[in-house]
C-alpha cells in the first residue's frame, strides 16, 4: 500500500464528520496561503517567487497528497491517541508529499505545526463539546512539550542546519511553548486586519509581513544567512511602518519588496507555514 493510501485509510471508516471538517479546513488554510499574492519570495499562482524548483502546481500536488493526513490526525486527536501515533502519521505524510513532488519539500513545516494544531482542535472539541479559541489550541500543544523537545531532529534538512549554525530556536521550541507567536502575534494581527479591511488577501499579507518582521525564520537564515534575515526583517518592518496593507498603494509597495527578495533568493517559508496555521485557527473558530 502506498504512503498516500495508508494516510487516507488511517482514520476510522467511516471517518467522523468532525475529523473531515477539520481536515478540510487545514487543507483550505494551506491553499489560502498559496493563493495569497503578492508575497515576497514565496510561490503564488502567478509566480515562483525565489524558487526555481517549484511552482503552484508543485504545491497543489502536495496538498492533494497530504489531504488524508489532516483527517487522520484530527481523528487521532479526538481519540486522544498517544503522541507516537501522531508522529507516525506525520512521517507518512512527509513520505506522501515527497513522492508527489519528486522529492521537493513543500509542506514539511506545515505537516508538523498544522498537524499538531488540528489534532488539539479535535481533541478539545471532543473533550469540552465546544469550539475552542485559537489560544486554547496553541496552549494545549504544550502538553506534548517533553516529547517534542526530546524528539530526534533531521540534521540533514536545510532548516536544521541553519538552526545549529546560528544557534537559534526552531519550530519545535515554538510548539513546546504553546506557539506564542501564533496566539500573541499572528492570530490577533489577522483578525484585526480582517475587521479593518474586510479583505482576506490584505489581512493575510499584513499577517505575513508581521511574522517576517518578528520570526527568526530558518528558511531566510538558510538562504541568506544573518544578513539575509536582517534584510527581510527590515523590509517587513518598513512596510508595516508605512501603513502595511491599510494604505491604497500597498500592492505597489509589496511588488518592490518582492523584487528585492527574489534578487537575493530569499523566501520566508517558515513564516508562510505560520500564516497557514493562523488562518486555520481563525477559520475553525467560526465553525
Image (tube, rainbow, N blue to C red):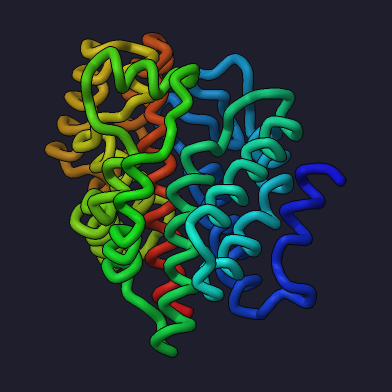
Pick the residue in front: 278 or 65.
65
Q: Residue furthest right?
A: 1
On the question of residue 193 being in view, the answer is: no
Specify the quadrant of the image occupied by residue 48: top right
Across and down, in percent, residue 173 comes to 27, 41
Across and down, in percent, residue 176 comes to 28, 50
Q: Residue at x 57, y 50 (%)?
A: 31
Residue 179 vertical position relative to residue 171 in the rendered view, above or below: below
Specify the quadrant of the image occupied by residue 231: top left
Pick the residue in front: 13 or 229.
13
Q: Residue at x 50, y 62 (%)?
A: 82
On the question of residue 21 being in view, the answer is: yes
Residue 11 vertical position relative to residue 92 in the rendered view, above or below: below
Residue 146 vertical position relative to residue 138 in the rendered view, above or below: above
Pick the residue in front: 260 or 142.
142
Residue 143 vertical position relative to residue 153 in the rendered view, above or below: below
188 sits to left or right of 48: left
32 sits to left or right of 228: right
Pick the residue in front: 232 or 99.
99
62 sits to left or right of 183: right
Across and down, in percent, residue 66 comes to 67, 48
Q: Residue furthest left?
A: 241
Q: Residue at x 40, y 10 (%)?
A: 263
Q: Exactly how many numbered labels are in the figure?
A: 0
Q: Residue at x 56, y 27 (%)?
A: 47
270 sits to left or right of 59: left
Across and down, in percent, residue 278 comes to 37, 56
Amino acid at each position: 500500500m502506498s504512503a498516500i493510501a495508508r494516510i487516507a485509510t488511517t482514520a476510522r471508516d467511516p471517518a467522523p464528520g468532525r475529523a473531515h471538517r477539520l481536515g478540510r479546513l487545514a487543507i483550505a488554510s494551506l491553499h489560502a496561503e498559496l493563493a495569497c499574492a503578492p508575497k515576497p519570495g514565496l510561490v503564488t499562482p502567478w509566480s515562483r517567487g525565489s524558487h526555481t524548483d517549484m511552482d503552484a502546481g508543485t504545491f497543489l500536488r502536495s496538498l492533494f497528497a497530504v489531504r488524508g493526513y489532516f483527517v487522520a490526525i484530527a481523528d487521532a486527536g479526538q481519540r486522544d491517541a498517544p503522541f507516537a501515533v501522531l508522529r507516525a502519521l506525520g512521517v507518512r505524510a512527509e513520505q506522501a508529499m515527497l513522492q508527489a513532488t519528486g522529492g521537493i519539500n513543500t509542506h514539511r513545516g506545515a505537516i508538523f505545526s498544522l498537524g499538531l494544531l488540528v489534532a488539539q482542535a479535535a481533541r478539545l472539541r471532543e473533550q469540552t463539546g465546544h469550539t475552542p479559541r485559537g489560544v486554547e489550541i496553541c496552549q494545549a500543544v504544550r502538553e506534548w512539550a517533553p516529547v517534542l523537545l526530546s524528539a530526534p531532529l533531521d540534521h540533514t534538512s536545510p532548516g536544521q542546519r541553519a538552526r545549529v549554525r546560528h544557534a537559534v530556536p526552531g519550530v519545535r521550541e515554538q510548539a513546546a511553548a504553546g506557539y506564542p507567536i501564533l496566539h500573541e502575534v499572528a492570530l490577533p494581527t489577522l483578525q484585526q486586519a480582517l475587521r479593518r479591511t474586510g479583505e482576506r488577501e490584505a489581512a493575510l499579507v499584513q499577517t505575513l509581513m508581521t511574522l517576517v518582521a518578528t520570526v527568526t525564520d530558518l528558511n531566510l537564515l538558510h538562504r541568506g544567512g544573518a544578513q539575509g534575515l536582517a534584510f527581510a526583517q527590515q523590509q517587513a518592518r518598513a512596510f508595516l511602518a508605512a501603513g502595511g496593507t491599510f494604505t491604497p498603494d500597498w500592492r505597489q509597495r509589496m511588488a518592490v519588496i518582492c523584487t528585492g527578495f527574489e534578487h537575493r533568493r530569499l523566501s520566508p517559508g517558515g513564516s508562510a507555514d505560520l500564516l497557514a496555521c493562523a488562518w486555520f485557527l481563525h477559520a475553525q473558530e467560526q465553525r
